Amino acid sequence: MPGYIIHLTAAKLWLAQRKERYDEEWRQKFLIGNLLPDAVENKETTHFRDPKTEGNSVRYPELSDFLRASEGIERTPFWWGFYYHLYIDSCFFQEYMPRIVTFLNEKGEEEEKICQIVKAKIHKTGLYVTREEYFSDMYYYGDFTKMNNVMTERFGLDLERKYEAALPKEWRKRADWIFSNLERFMRESETERGELQVFDLEDLILFLKEKAEAFLGEDKTAVLRKDKADIKEQKDF
């Protein structure tokens, strides 16, 4: 899945389109909320993936399931950040992943089931590697590490810890997880340089910009227009 820095970049790109609309506190809470889905050990509980896709190499959040699950919850900046994270994951895995890799079975046919995949074709280079090699520091995850430093320098992905105190109690204890991981990712990125093996950095940033433009947030997204529930603000998120 996209890492913390990619998600923060995507969130910053969305906020940049609304500079005059939100104050600094709202923006910081949105950024923190944007990391919450990954601030758990078992991401199945926070990513709302279809159980029918278990065993697939690529899975993505079902946004409508999240909207149903969060009915009655106040749509705070934390909520919007959480939702935006799931939105980017959904876009990334359904639209961007097929642009960078194809998974193949032993017959050379496209394959989605992990147990049937024997190799992955990296579109950037035409190189064939095993699925395990693809999802490793040599390729996919290694590229994320290399991109982290560039993304941080370009978009200024700073977070203010003082706003974590406003998180609901059940999420407040995960704040240390978020910030300790961010610090670790940044330390690792400082020593990882070199050519990207899977991604084209500028193409990825353009994709994230396009998805940011398509997400209208409080102006109502396409998904939200399908959500006919009358949300009552009863709880905090």
Image (cartoon, grey):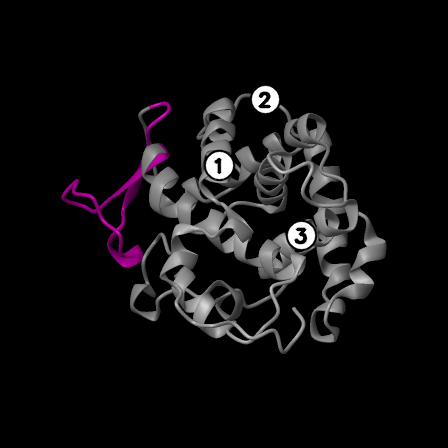
Left or right for 110, reference 80? left
How far is mark 3 from mark 2, CA to CA? 32 Å
Left or right for 10, reference 93? right
Judge whether 153 appears above or below 218 on screen. above
Left or right for 142, reference 173? left
Q: How crowded is mark 2: few (under 14 residues within 10 Å), some or many (20 or more)?
A: few
User: Which residue is at the front of the view, 21 or 195?
Assistant: 21
- Mark 3: which secondary structure? helix
Q: Which residue is located at x 62 percent, y 46 percent? A: 4
Q: Which mark is residue 54?
A: none
Residue type marked 2: Gly
Q: Which residue is located at x 44 percent, y 51 percent? A: 221
- Per the rendered image, the range of residues in magenta is 100-125
Q: Mark 1 points at which residue?
A: 213
Judge whether 188 appears above or below 165 on screen. above
Q: Which residue is located at x 64 percent, y 30 percent? A: 151
Sequence-earlier tag: 1 or 3: 3
Q: Which residue is located at x 61 percent, y 61 percent? A: 79
Residue type marked 1: Glu
Pointer 3 with pointer 2, Cβ within 8 A: no
* Image coordinates for residue 73, horizontal then vertical, percent: 58, 73
Q: Residue 30 carries which label?
A: 3
How far is mark 1 from mark 3, CA to CA? 17 Å
| 179 magenta-colored | no
- Mark 1: which secondary structure? helix
